[in-house]
Image: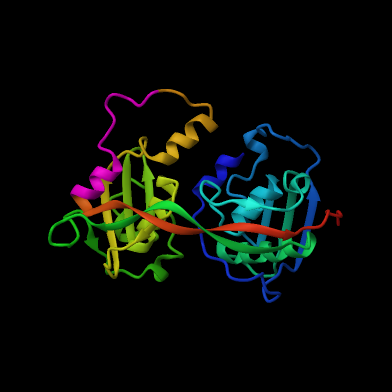
Amino acid sequence: MAFFLLAFSATTLVAQSTPTSRFDVASVKIAPTQYPGGPRPAEQITPAGIRVLPGGRVESYGQTLRNLIAWVYDVNTVFQRIEGGDQQILETEFTISAKVPTPSLSRAEAKIMTRALLEERFRLRWRLQPREVDGFALVPSRDNGRPGPGLRPFTGDCEARADNPSVRFESPDYEAKARCGWTGMLARQRGVGVSMTQVAERLTVLMATPVSDDTEWPGRFSFDLTAGTDAMPLMGILRPAMGIRSPLPTDDPPQLLEVLRTELGLKLVKKRTATNDFIIESIEPFIED
């Protein structure tokens, strides 16, 4: 199940969670069936770590404590380490059911509350330890230092769009009505109202190593590209983890990094950069509630 964590971006954490945001009711239990070292059936897994449901509810099942820590603390386990702690506890799978008395709960709020829950139930104490790794910087690729023809300024309001209903990916109304973000599907990449920082964060996932925004381009942008991601480092990690060994198709579309250069005016250059490993200073055996 480790490959589910590869899509998480790394966010700098500076302190233990505070008691200001906690679940009203929360249950944490050892999963009745454990799959140590083996894949759990897909229907028995919460792929994103936790599910945020209507009515202020949060659920998680089929995840080890290590995976939960990675998800709620935004640890990208491709290039960040989780070190220390009792390995038996960390590899035990748990189920979580929690609730707050509000009609809705954002994913970010759910993460903060789940951090507090883990710190309370497991007496989890942690710190961040900086470490240098090989990464990349996102920089302009054109001689004039300006965006390419495929990168269009965005003048909408991302906050106002946050509550918009979902728009079909292929819809002609997608750019006008979709929530802000970068979505890829079937070798098509569509970005709506994304900053260069968000582009660098998405490339951090695909490159499986930190990517920093060094463009100095302010504002937000939109784009609609035909570009494949099969050659990206992330896919080289995911395919073996998922048991996929088939070669790339011969009619593969242009690859993303080339299209970024020609259409968006962006490229990656190697850069030595810092990341933070997640160090567990103390964790106590779990007592079921």
Residue 238 at x, y percent in the picture: 49, 36
Q: Is residue 14 above or below residue 180?
A: below
Residue occupying the point 73% across, 35% down = 36
Q: Which residues are magenta?
A: 247-262
Residue occupying the point 77% across, 50% down = 86
Residue lying at the far left of the rendered structure: 144
Give the camera-side residue of 111 and 273: 273
* Residue 255 part of the magenta segment: yes
Compared across the picture, whether 1 is left or right of 135 comes to: right
Residue 220 at x, y percent in the picture: 30, 66
Q: Is residue 101 above or below residue 57?
A: below
Q: Is residue 168 visible?
A: no
Q: Is residue 47 visible?
A: yes
Compared across the picture, whether 96 is left or right of 201 comes to: right
Residue occupying the point 28% across, 24% down = 250
Residue 142 at x, y percent in the picture: 16, 56
* Residue 3 part of the magenta segment: no
